[in-house]
Image (cartoon, rainbow, N blue to C red):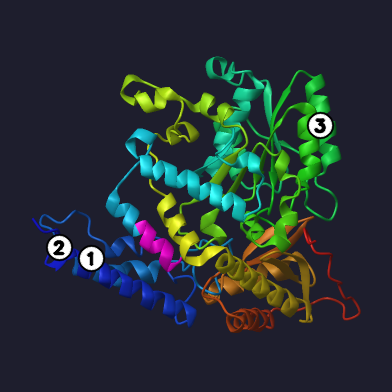
Amino acid sequence: MSVTLGDDSFRSAIGEVAAILEDYWEDLREERLPVTPDLRPGDVRAMLPDRVPVHGEPIRDVLADVRRVVMPGLVHWQHPSFLGYYPTQTSPASVVGELLASGLAVQHMMWSTGPAATELEEAVLDQLAVALGLPERFLSGGNGGGVLQDSASSAVLVAVVAALYRASGGRWREHGAEGRYRLYCTDQANSCVPKASRIAGLGEPVLIATTAGTCEMDPRALRERLAADRAAGVVPAIVVASVGTTGTCAIDPVAAVAAVCREFAAWLHVDAAYAGSAAVCPENRWINEGVEHADSYAVNCHKWLLTGPPCDAMWVADRHSLTAAMDIRPAFLRNQASDSGDVTDFRDWQVPLMHPFRALKLWFVLRTHGVEGLRAHIREQLSHAALFADLVRESPGFELVSHSLGLVCFRLSGDNARTERLRADLDATHQILVTPATVDGRYILRAALGSRLASRTSVRNAWALVREVAASIPDDRPTSSETSATPSVGAR
């Protein structure tokens, strides 16, 4: 029996989807669409039926409603003026790989349930590690290896679990955290870090001070706290260092942090969800100085590597602590290959049992773009951020707070209220999206340059809109006071 979708063939439906995406990307590139929709809660729901149809509808009708209902109600993350969050990227190669994986419907929780999928994932992650200049200890040929998680949140959670297993000598599996173990990070760490600490039963993380003016973890403060905790009978289980914090893209000094972790036998997880992709360019590999001493490392391929979400690449230096902590093997999961110990079963590397074929879309991206294509992509993105920073610096009445990789942080001169007003007025235009952060009591705005559809013209257009909106905000500062720009946070 032929596969059909209503009155339309599968092939024609796929062709129409491709046309929708091509038109959509072109509309975004030409900035014909707003960045955010002008909607109130419930507006989209009111356009949708309350019941599943009794009889199936033609796929063309469903696609028509995608155009009519869904797309006008989206926040367009691929828009050149979507600057509010670190990018979530995709590309034609990723879409094709995702489509193929969806059609194959393979899930390789164990090698025996998907040999080709498992070994392709291992190979792709080894290739990506080499492309990023990561150390050999993360490659699958030795004790380490990689796995594709759904997010950096999942990566840090399983890193915490592995750290607890190692710190307890395996006791954690039977006795739990026992109130003795702690996670350490700074207040600049992503929200997924304290969430993982809570889920794992460690409670709130211990916050380590940052070095003044940098938002980077202070290794001396870390050592003092770990020493005090150990003296009090607390076990420092894991330290999470950030390579590209959410607020300002600060880069923690991984080498110095790693030295402290080695002294106290604490697991070091490096959360490089955003910035890690920049290391595909050799000139950016300073961000990973010291990572050869890390126990685990994670980067979101769906942020900067043209791969659609979800796709987080995580590597561990010693797979045993992770798999020993996560392994549960009832009879229905036992098989000769797994029992031999000669294969990788990704069910032991993650929280879910199911492991989807994420490697296929990443493989398509790596093969079709190549290392040089990815480098060109990152360099173009960084040039857009540099241009935006220059425009801020050259504009009277604005302060350039920091510029690190693709993130530019700025504010209006004067009190916080003026910048808060600017953010609200920009939101009201629906033509640009920026998000706030607070650094040393100052309210700032974050512009994360990261759309693959952006151009130098679109960057200039975005800044022109910021200046236009800012011009209507009263400046009640004394005319004699001028605020100078502060040093770049995390810049090298």
Amino acid at the residue labelled 3: Arg
In the rendered structure, does residue 95 fall within the stretch colored magenta? yes
Kindly identify the residue that appears in the image at 74 percent across and 21 percent down: 234
Q: Which residues are magenta?
A: 91-98
Q: Which element is circle 1 on?
A: helix
Report if residue 273 is visible in the image: no
Q: Which element is circle 2 on?
A: loop
User: Mark 1 or mark 3, which is nearer the start of the sequence?
Assistant: 1
Q: CA distance from mark 3 to mark 1?
A: 58 Å
Q: Which residue is tagged 2?
A: 57
Kindly identify the residue that appears in the image at 75 percent across and 78 percent down: 390
Amino acid at the residue labelled 1: Val
Are there few (<14), some (14-19), or many (20+) residues within 10 Å of tag 2?
Answer: few
Q: How many numbered discs sit on the rendered protein?
A: 3
Q: Nearer the viewer, residue 439 or 240?
A: 240
Instruction: Answer with the quarter of the image where residue 296 lies.
Output: top right
Instruction: Look at the numbered discs 1 and 2 and tell me whether their residues touch, using CB distance below 8 Å.
Output: yes
Q: Nearer the viewer, residue 379 or 158?
A: 379
Instruction: Look at the numbered discs 3 and 1 and tell me whether their residues touch, using CB distance below 8 Å.
Output: no
Q: CA distance from mark 3 to mark 2?
A: 62 Å
Amino acid at the residue labelled 2: Glu
Rendered-image quadrant of the N terminus: bottom left
Q: Which residue is tagged 3?
A: 225
Q: Which residue is tagged 1?
A: 62
